[in-house]
Image (cartoon, helix red, strand yellow):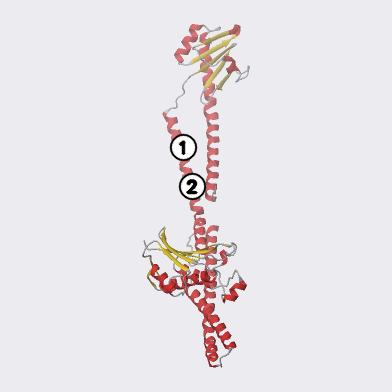
Amino acid sequence: MYKSLFSRLSFSLFSTLLLITIIIVTTLSIIVAEEPKRLLSERLLRYNIEKIGIPPSNKNLKQFSEQLQISLTVTGENNFLWNSRKGLPQPNLLESLTSPDTQFDFLRLRTFKQVVLLRHKNFSYYISDYEGQLSSKAKLTLVLAIISILLVLFINRRFIHWLFHPLKQLKADAIKISEGDIEHHLITNRKDELGELTQSVNAMAEKLQNNIRSKRQLLLAISHELRTPLARAKMYLSLMPKNEYQEKLDNNLNTLNSLIEALLQSETLGDSREELNITEVNMNLLIQEIMNEYETDRIHFKASQQSYKLQADKLRIKLLISNLLNNALQYTDDIVEIELYYQNKNIQCIIKDHGKGIAKDEVPHLTEAFYRPDKSRQRKTGNYGLGLYLCQKIIDAHSGKLEIKSKLGQGTSIILSFKTQD
């Protein structure tokens, strides 16, 4: 079971205070209460037992026990034994709890059962069944002590909570940064070490944001600059006499142009919805529209209802599904299944193929830019590892989720989840 630092610290402090309280109360009860009580009890008992006489008479013993409302057992010389009633603890049991030279003692039989022992002139008096009652002042003091201890613990808990509160904020901040929300900063007025740590995390997030922004601006600048020489190269190529080399060169230029276009698309999206043209999109009709662009009967579409409506950028969603569908058709000769359904306030779209599948350790890296699990096959197909990277950017811009499940020899499923307005 997981235990937080706050819980452990609270438990440790509570245990320490509880032990200290028990020690103080026990010590005070022994020093302040027990010893004076023992001395007074012994003196009063010896004073009264002197009047009973030696050897004690049954009449005096009975009168003594009835007046004090106690149970009494007396043993002594010449095998003397007297009990005020039946069922009292046996003298041999009581003697086993003490030593013969003990003159006065409180013998504990059970947790709350005590017997007072008094030895007087070769006779032992065992007094039991006496009732001890706390005074009103003692009860009030006990209640106030318990309330004070609880109040101290509550104040201490609140103080610890305040002391370590920035750690919870830092955890939430780190999660948001890891999820891509690097613009989220934590504000704190603390001047201690945790305050300094918070400022360090904010500084780290700011530097990370600047680095990502600089990288994006660089990619956009390079992509834009490459468009002009590419356009010139294609123009010059069109003026050249047609031959086999011209066709190959034209294909390479088209591939390079597609690569630049994918970079522009992905980096323009960034991490926000600013570049999106949000409208109401009927997912059923959009998928049918995409399917009509493919001259194949290998695409099977299934939806559990007539209309799944989503607030999204239609062109970007179309590009997303088209890229995933292209990959599925490209790497399998079998059918490709598309399914739409509604679950937990999300519209989910599954694109499933029955191809060779992808190794488990490769799956987490598929949405990284320029990552290719099968380098040789990707080169043959003209892919450069930007398709799924662009798909991830589109789904992130729509605050959705892209999940890839794949098994070697069984195929790959890509699950798209979009939050609805319900």
Secondary structure of the residue carrying tag 1 is: helix
Label 2: how many Cα within 10 Å (few below 14, some 14–19, many 20+): some
Where in the figure is residue 41, as x and y percent of width and height?
52, 20
Tell me how many marks there are: 2
Where in the figure is residue 186, as x and y percent of width and height?
48, 62
Q: Of residues 355 and 134, which is closer to you in this image?
A: 355
- Kind of residue at badge 2: Arg
Q: Is residue 209 visible?
A: no
**Disc 2 + disc 1, Cβ < 8 Å:** no
Q: Which mark is residue 146?
A: 1
Q: What residue is shown at x 60% (from left), y 70% (from top)?
A: 374
- Kind of residue at badge 1: Ile
Mark-to-mark CA distance, 2 and 1: 16 Å
Secondary structure of the residue carrying tag 2 is: helix
Label 1: how many Cα within 10 Å (few below 14, some 14–19, many 20+): few
Q: Quick check: 96 above or below 81?
A: below
Where in the figure is residue 418, as x and y percent of width and height?
43, 64
Q: Which mark is residue 276?
A: none
In this picture, residue 15 sits left or right of residue 141: right
Q: What residue is shown at x 55% (from left), y 58% (from top)?
A: 193
Q: Quick check: 90 above or below 35?
A: above
- Counting residues from the N terminus, which is met first, the one under dot 2 or under dot 1? 1
Q: Is residue 262 visible?
A: yes
Q: Which residue is mark 2?
A: 157
Q: Of residues 208 and 136, which is closer to you in this image?
A: 208
Q: Of residues 310 and 331, which is closer to you in this image?
A: 331
